[in-house]
Structures are given as structure tokens and as C-alpha cells.
Amino acid sequence: MTQLQSFGRPLVMIGCGNMAGAILSRWLQCGLDPAQVTVVDPHRAEIQAGVTLLAALPARMPDDAVVVLGVKPQLLPEVTPVLAPLLGSGNLVISMLAGVTVDQLRLSLGAAPGFVRIMPNTPVALGQGVCAFYVDARTAGGWELAAQTLLAPLGLSERIATEDAFDLVTALTGCGPAFVYRFIDAMKRGAMELGMEGDQAARLALATVRGAANLAGSVPEDPAVLADRVASKGGMTREGLDVLDADDRLVRLMADTLRAARDRGKELNALSG
């Protein structure tokens, strides 16, 4: 049996853009019955076969439906007055809305007993993503289990103990793929600057990062240890690492990058509050 074949609850996705669409595709690949799924999105003209597509919220919500909020955060005030009356004691709300806290969701959608805040990243489409999630003390264990069942096929699902940490986690995992893509591009462009042909540099940089990441994920050693193992004394790798390691420049660059993303998350939280 595939991972979600036995998931018996209706699923209502409100908003189905790039990220939510990737998640839905992964769920369907993992056995979720498309007949269980309703997508509410006025901007989509088509959806996967068997999935119900609506331009507006239905007049009634299934009593045991899991509701996934995937709209842009700024659209939440338009959605909540219509959605709130439809929710009841059997519904679980999973929110992908950046900068919107569980307390804010409870305030505007308070009828549902279960609220889970998630932050997925783009590799969830391959089942190789990271999906950080937070549940508050009022969300009972059964609701959390239902959420974890849905998150498991997406890759690593990691519970965040305090919502205060969500912005930093989002900076690391939600924004992180973009930072990795930029690093791959920098490897390619650096090689080109030294004379390598562009397409070849791109292939070699991507394959190098892919292989190194796969190896790092398959062994118990810390990546720092793996780096030092590649770097023999006086060799080419050590010479290059000495440039990256000088004054902890790479660590400081990464800390500055994460800080900027985290602080922007805090600013967005303040705006949405």
C-alpha cells in the first residue's frame, strides 16, 4: 500500500499555486485518492484528473475535512469571513501562510480545534523536501498525527518546539533551496571566469553538488569532517578551503544571509498582525 492510500479524510485545498500544487502532485503520486480532494482556486483553469476544482468555497465543508490554506497571506482577510462559518469541530486546518501565526489563525477561524502551521520547501515535489511544522498546545495529538501522515511523503518533517523559531527555520529550510541554487550558479560562474565553457561548467557544478549532498546524507559523519577528509595537506582542495575558511568568511556570509531572511520574516509577521 502506498503512503496515503489509506488516508480516509476529505482534503480541501484553498489556493493551489506553485508550492501547494507541487504538494498536491506528490500526495497523488503517493496514493491519495483524487476523489477525496477539492481545490478552491479561481485562478486555475485545470487540475489533476479526478480532483474537484472550484472557483469559490463550497456552501458546506465536510465535517472531517482537512483544510489546507495555500493562499497568499495578504488574501487571508478576504478568505476568513467566508471560511470561518464553514469550519466545525471535526476540521483540521493546515496553514502554509508565511508570517501568520497559529494564534492569528485561531482568532479568525476559531471553530476548528486543530491548527498546524507548516513551511515546506520546493524539493517536496520529489519527496525530498523539508517540511517544518508547528502545533500549539491546544491542537490535540490526533490532529497532529493526521498532519504528520500528510507531511511524511514530502520528505523530512520536523516539528518546531516554539513558534518563535519559525522565522529562522523558514530562512534555513524554506529559503534554503534558493541559497543552494545560488551556490551552484556561483560554482558554475567561477569556473567560467577561469575559462571553462558554460554548459559544461553548469553540468559539472550541479552533478558535484548533487553527489556531495547524497553522500553527506548517507554517512554519519558531520559535513565538516567530510570536507577535511577530501582535503589532503598541501593539496588542491586544502588550498581552496583555506580561501573559504579564512576568517570564517563562508560561515559569516551564511549567517548574514539567514539573518536577513529571518528578520524579513519577523517584519512580515508584524505587518500581518
Image (cartoon, rainbow, N blue to C red):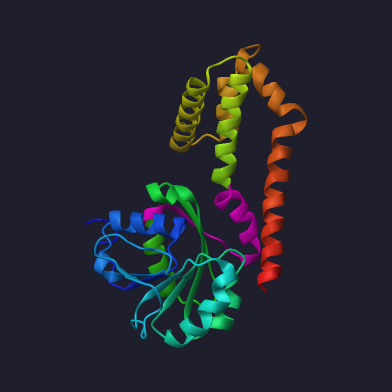
Q: Residue furthest right?
A: 247
Question: In the current view of this chain or complex, which residue is farthest to the left?
Answer: 1
From the viewer's side, name the closer residue of 57 and 132. 57
Up/down of 231 relative to 172, above or below: above
Task: Give the answer, above or below, for where 93 lies relative to 29.
Answer: below
155 within the magenta span: yes
Q: Residue at x 43, y 51 (%)?
A: 124
Horizontal side, residue 261 vs residue 55: left or right: right
Q: Give the range drawn in magenta.
A: 153-175
**Residue drawn at x 55%, y 80% as measured from the top left:** 106
Residue 230 lies, with reference to residue 105, above or below; the image says: above
Q: Image quadrant for the C terminus?
A: bottom right
Q: Is residue 152 magenta?
A: no
Which residue is more in the foreground, 141 or 209? 209
Front-most of residues 105 and 155: 105
Residue 37 drawn at (x, y percent): 31, 69
Q: Look at the magenta stretch and give its main secondary structure.
A: helix
Location of residue 44 by image quarter: bottom left
x and y, in percent, of residue 118 in the image: 51, 63
> Quadrant of the rendered structure where residue 264 is?
bottom right
> How many numbered marks have been drawn onto this rendered protein structure?
0
Q: Residue at x 64, y 18 (%)?
A: 238
Q: Can residue 112 be seen in this view?
A: no
- The answer to whether one can see residue 254 in this image is yes
Place of residue 169 in the rendered image (x, y in percent of width and height, measured from the top left): 60, 55
Q: Residue at x 25, y 69 (%)?
A: 35
Q: Which residue lies furthest to the bottom in this view?
A: 85
Tell me the quadrant of the picture where the N terminus can be found: bottom left
Residue 266 position within the rendered picture, expressed as x and y whole percent measured from the top left: 70, 62
In front: 236, or 52? 52
Residue 46, image quadrant: bottom left
